[in-house]
Image (tube, coloured by chain):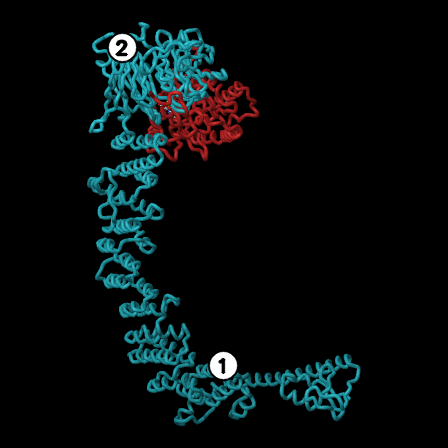
Amino acid sequence: MPEVSKMKKPDVKVVLLGDMNVGKTSLLHRYTERKFRDTISTVGGAFFLKQWGPYNISIWDTAGREQFHGLGSMYCRGAAAVILTYDVTNWQSLAELEERFLSLTDTANHDCIYAVVGNKADLIDPKAQMFQDSGGEPEDRTELEKDRTEPQVLSSCPTPPASPASPSGMILHKPVTHEDAVALYGRILRYKGLEEKSSLPAEKMCFETSAKTGYNVDTLFETLFDLVLPSILRKRNENQASPTVDLEECRGKRARTSCC
Amino acid sequence: MSVKAFELVPAVERDLLMGDKARINIECIECCGKHLYVGTNDCFIHHFLMDEVTSSKGKLSYSAQKLLHKYLGLKKAVAELRAASALERLIVLCDGIVFLVDMVTLETVPSAAGGGAKIRGVTAFCINENPVNGDPFCVEIGVLSSKRRTVQIYMVYEDRVQLVKELTTPEQPCAVSVDGYFLCLALTTQYMILNYNTGASQDLFPYNSEERTPIVKRIGREEFLLAAPGGLGMFANAEGVSQRAPVNWSENVIGATVCFPYVVALDESFITIHSMLDQQLKQTLSFRDGHILQDFEGKVILASTKAVYVLVPLPLERQIQDLLASHRVEEALTLTEGAQRNIPKDKFQILHKRILQQAGFIQFGQLQFQDAKEHFRKGQLDVRELISLYPLLLPASSSFTRCHPPLHEFADLNHLAQGDQDKVLRCKKFLISYLGEARSTEVANGCREDVDTALLKLYAELDHESLLDLLASENACVLQDSVPWLEKYHKYFALGLLYHYNGQDSAALQLWIQVVDGSLQDSTRSDLYEYIVDFLCSCSSPDLVWKYAGWVLQKDPTKGIHIFTKRPVSKDHPELRPEDVIACLEKHSQALLLYLEHLVLEKKIEKEKLHTQLAVLYLERVVSLLSKSPPDEELLTRARDRLQALLRESNLYRAQYLLGKMEKYEQLLLERATLHGKLEEHDKALHILVHKLRDFSSAEAFCLWASSSRDSEYKQHLFHLLLGVYLDRNPSGKSQATVKSGSVDLEMAAVDLLNRHGEVFDAVRVLRMLPDDWSMQLLRPFLGRALRASMHASRTSRITLGLAHSENLQLLHDRLKERKKPIFVSAKKGCHLCHNTFSEPDVVCLPGGVPVHSHCVAQRVRDSPTKRQLTNSSNHT
Ligand SMILES: Nc1nc2c(ncn2[C@@H]2O[C@H](COP(=O)(O)OP(=O)(O)OP(=O)(O)O)[C@@H](O)[C@H]2O)c(=O)[nH]1
Ligand SMILES: [Mg+2]
């Protein structure tokens, strides 16, 4: 059997985690394609290779559906950054990050950085709603205009809850404040056993984005890329320090060399 | 979004295998080159020889020939068959026992003395295709035993097996695959990686193996394909990291494998084919009673319960072409690029380029020019492929023929645009920008003529401003092909530039002249005439200048003369001889005048002939203006000013000759006076000025002018002359009456002259000349000045004298102080000047106390008046 071709080896991994429907796929799509378009709920996972200067960064879009929950640890293994995504109109999606997703990041690098990202900011923040992405497609704008003329959209948010009920049996569907996100970030640090003082500050690591308008999307990804650079360099140095032997060479001879 | 990537080809049909025995099913298969082994549920192994047959149409089929079958004698199904071809053994799992069978005879291999050739209690085993131990005469297998929660590693030799490792697992394992030291295991509730060398383990992800059959398939070095919850095909490497995105299968996948770049999976009724490159489902083949899917050295073989099939991949190129045919550019490129490592480098590059070019043309056809351009660039498209789409753009001389097979489906641009003129235009604009960029790169190497000619044609047709830039700079436009095209679009100016570029300046000029004259229409340049003048001006061929000078001068002598006057002086511009130019200008008096002015006034050429000719021309102009009635005063004044200026400033013309020409024109007195002045006939000049013109200020100016480069005596002479003329009471040829009336004016003029220029005159002489009856009052300013001047002169000279005297004394004093010692003079010593001896004591001392004869010094002083100070000596004895 011929060896399966390896693709360009990524230098570093960034993983998007979060409940279904919070907009992970949409965020990645906005960043890579500069468009907002209909998505279907992600199956399994997908990834995108981003060239960042001389480095290759793989960005993994995971599936939020419960069914695929078990794969999360594997996706996070060796991650340099994890983007914990929630939906700003859905308080439950923030709660899920702590309840379900945080433990998946145990397999990430010990110096992994965490960003808490509230997506769909266009539904609660006029600033995000009015934002125009430079690369935006015209149809986005018309949609935007439609929204503008129907401000009631904000109150009658169509986003379905991620999980049908909260532990208390009550549907938690209230918007998430920035303070909630900052508080969660603090708890994440505690969970990781990290000193708040020596870690990246919450103001820097809590984002509100809109995949729909593009608001803050570039900032989010680019901030993270810049922050993971040291991790890349360290990884490269490690590789140089302990050169690995290419075992492929010595394995040329197989038991099943030829047939009869 | 389907691709035809594989074809299902029958290999062993039901008849051949079991005939009409309905209850016999295939349980396992093994393929090794042409040898196919099939294990059945009735404990038989069948051995077939499978030949590939390619039909004349290129269709592949298999013909199978049964070699042997053998009953293993266990009454149980044959669960697994694996070949160890180097050992010539089949490793068989049947009834929970692993044992060895000869590959040729299918006889069970008896246990060797001292070592068993059987492993009992086995539920599954797998061969390590990438063993760390390099012994070619043994095979390493991973074994799952029915013993609880263990996995074992055995070495299999020709006639024995040997346990080398046993490890316990946290749960019961139910599927295994091995690569190097890494075992990939499906346990009851999860997958894990286990390093049998170090014992280190790595959990992968949870999976309920009791609910769904797990799949653990090694797909490459330290990489496995696993069935994951939700019907996913997940990739995981030995470190427990997923490096590829999962593919989305159905929930009931039985078997899966990778045939790069595809993941092939089998469920009860379909074979699904996903691309590993974009995770998309590419092909679905229906397959009933699917039972086994395995790959053997790259060959994918499937079996239903009754028959065996081969899944034959279609040639990559064909798949790519299929994708391109349905305009799926991105997928085609992904597929091509994904195959890079499976194709030899040079072959890949050729394929890749071609696919890029085809992709570019598809996008071009969709007017996605940006993408098209990028693909053309990456695919290093021969630009002529693109140019040749546009009818008539390639020059007739071009040797280009389109590549075969064609890169696209378009006959030409019209075919592509289907009559949509807007499309055509956009395509043309694209080509302009594309060629414009290609020109400056090596892409255009070897076909510059084609590129530049095409560009020229497009520019001309679309009235593009860069046409002129193209022609004015280095280019390779084919003249023959471009001429009719430029003519068609009335780009005559451009055509002229092209002629010029091709060294046919005469053709260029003829064309432009026709445009200026209106017989050809081209509005490119409204200043084409000036352009022609500039052109001739810098034209290196004198012949052309002579040839077109007539036309140019006739059109506009003032501007036209620039072809001679503005001609740059440099090596490659042979100078035109002024005589030739003048001869040429014979019929163009105005131009001639301008030319002479250029020579005389600007270039300051000092030639009598030129100066005289210019003066004559000026004169003729004045005369012709005079002859009009009434004369245009303004023009006349200007013409005369010029004439006068020349007469005054030049010293080279033949004054006498001009004077002769002017004699009969009473109006030109001033000019005549100037001429007389030139001839030093000042009295005549002054006479004219004073008596004929009565223009006293001119007379005065004349004196200043005529004496301007002379010494003060000459000036004084002239002023006295003028004064004389003023005071002359009886000028010749005048009646007494006129004299009487004029004399007052003249006297006043004389007074003014004296009062204004008193310092020039010799006052004593003036006083003698003046009539006695003039009042002092009248001459007060003059006298005052004269008095003051003479006083001043006297005082100045006295001061000079005094100063000189005191200086003299001072020097004398210094000298005495210096040389107190006497100076000896004797008859034996010689004089320094004449070298004769002294005969008397009277001597003069030179500075430094050198005695010399006094007559020698006197002599010396006379010879060099500047050394007067030498006389500041005194006698010594
Ligand atoms: N208004 C608004 N809607 C958004 C935004 N981002 C995503 N959506 C919508 O939210 C829905 C879910 O988006 P996805 O990107 O598929 O969500 P996901 O997190 O990838 O979901 P899973 O793949 O199931 O985990 C879609 O209907 C999107 O159109 C946003 O910024 N603003
Ligand atoms: Mg998604």
Residue at the farthest front position: B113
Chain identity for the colour red used in the image: A
Q: Amino acid at mark 2?
A: Asn
Q: Which residue is mark 1?
A: B709
Q: Amino acid at mark 1?
A: Ser
In the rendered view, tell whether residue B759 sits above or below residue A115.
below
Q: Are circles 1 and 2 on residues that touch, CB within 8 Å?
A: no
Discs 1/2, front: 2
Query: Is B7 positioned to the left or the right of A175 in the image?
Result: left
Q: Which quadrant of the figure contains the N terminus of chain A?
A: top left
Query: Is B492 positioned to the left or the right of B851 in the image?
Result: left
Q: Position of residue B237 (x, y in %)?
A: 43, 21
Q: Are marks 1 and 2 on the same chain?
A: yes
Q: Position of residue B69 (x, y in %)?
A: 28, 12
Q: Which quadrant of the figure contains the C terminus of chain A?
A: top left
In the rendered view, tell whether residue B270 sits above or below residue B634.
above
Is residue A161 something one can see in this rendering?
A: no
Measure how far apart labels 1 and 2 are at the Cα level: 135 Å
What label sits on residue B25 in the rendered view? 2
On what subunit does the disc labeled 2 rest?
B
* Foreground of the two, B206 or B761: B206
Q: Residue at x 33, y 35 (%)?
A: B347
* Foreground of the two, B12 or B691: B12
Q: Where, by quadrant of the figure, is residue B177 drawn?
A: top left
Total marks in image? 2
Badge 2 crowding class, 10 Å Cα cut-off, few under 14, some 14 to 19, many 20 or more, is many
Q: Position of residue B238 (x, y in %)?
A: 44, 20
On what subunit does the disc labeled 1 rest?
B
Chain identity for the colour cyan used in the image: B
At mark 1, the secondary structure is loop
Q: Position of residue B306 (x, y in %)?
A: 25, 13
